[in-house]
Amino acid sequence: MADPTPASRRRSGESPVHVFWETKLAFDFMRWRQLTLMLSTLLIVASLTLLGVRGLNFGLDFTGGTLVEVNFPDAADPQTVRLGLEAQGYGDLVVQNFGTARDVLVRVPPDVVGETATVGDVILAALRADYGDQVALRRSEFVGPAVGEELREQGGLAMLAALSLVMVYIMFRFQFKFAIGALLALVHDVLIVLGFFSIFYIGFNLTVLAAILAVIGYSLNDTIVVSDRIRENYRRKRKSDNVDVINRSLNQMLGRTLITSLTTLLVLFALLILGGDFIQNFAIALICGVIVGTYSSIYVLCNNLILMNLNFEDLAIKKSETYDDGMP
């Protein structure tokens, strides 16, 4: 007869400590902790260097410029429209479908056309020269550089506020060492996503900023789940080695982590492929963030806990707390 599984042994009433201790290690995560520490350090340094030297390709939301929406009588290919405008001397434009295949949004950087009040009319005249008088102007909106600078500052403050609130929450919910690990994991994720956008010079607009804030939330969720399991296992096996406790905790959460990440990535790849140009950069930021966030919740958080020598005394149960000795 086959050995009972940990789940069946818990149902039979066997001690959770024995069940935990005999959990098979399918993968020795912490075996690679020094290599992953060097990898994370290298990625962070590379991202900071890229951001300092190359910077981000800020969109009109941050730099200012004009949005011109036009309607074509038939379906229009954004690439063809952009090349036609470049042939007439209007370069550095971002052209994409907006809504339907017949609606096109043209993003015009400052100083490309000249007078702000005539940008819409100039672009419309250029398009009518190629496609006829049936091309109609839907709207023309100007975003000033001052507004763009304000949006950039507010976006940065929003990320700082999110990181600060996360650290405070985890410090009270778990313990200070967990808070430091979670904060480092979140900063790690944000910097690598920004570095990815910098090295490929992908357009950075408000939708990408929203995606980065979503990445913070996703990474935090993974970090809290892993932290909770590590804390519970420390309390069950008080005298065990911290590397072993963390390894067993990660193996217990491996199935949940992989299923969550893979199902999320399936949706994001569907958005990337089928969602159109308007949300393409949004999907790219989330895909990069989910992959890096899954990695950081395992290695950045746990490496920090080992380096800070997390032990049972850090997680001792207070008299006011109640503790369920059953496996969650």
Image (cartoon, grey):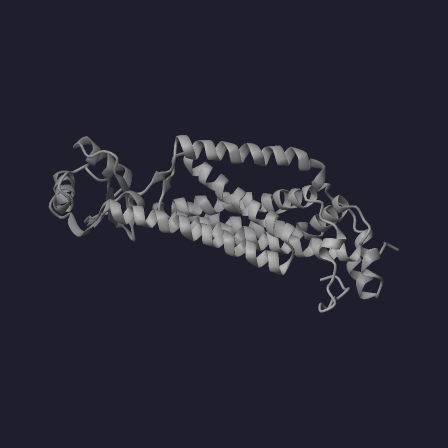
Q: In this view, does 230 lie to the left or right of 80?
A: right
User: What x and y, as percent, mark residue 251?
Assistant: 71, 48
Which residue is pictured at 80% across the width and 62% down the height? 10
Task: Work out whether residue 13 can be spotted.
Answer: yes
Looking at this view, is 67 or 37 the one in front?
A: 37
Indicate left or right for 283 with 264 as reference: left
Rendered residue at 76%/53% (across/down): 312
Residue 33 at x, y percent in the picture? 67, 37
Which quarter shows the N terminus? bottom right
Front position in the image: 311 or 100: 311
Q: How many labels does the image show?
A: 0
Compared to residue 88, the image places residue 168 above or below, namely below
Looking at the image, residue 223 sits to the left or right of residue 8; the answer is: left
Using the image as rendered, state which of residue 275 and residue 235 is in the foreground: 235
Image side of residue 149 versus residue 162, left or right: left
Image location of residue 63, percent across then percent down = 28, 42
Q: Which residue is drawn at 84% across and 56% down?
A: 18
Quadrant location of the C terminus?
Answer: bottom right
Q: Can residue 199 be seen here?
A: no
* Residue 285 in picture, x, y percent from top left: 45, 45
Residue 260 sits above or below residue 308 on the image = below
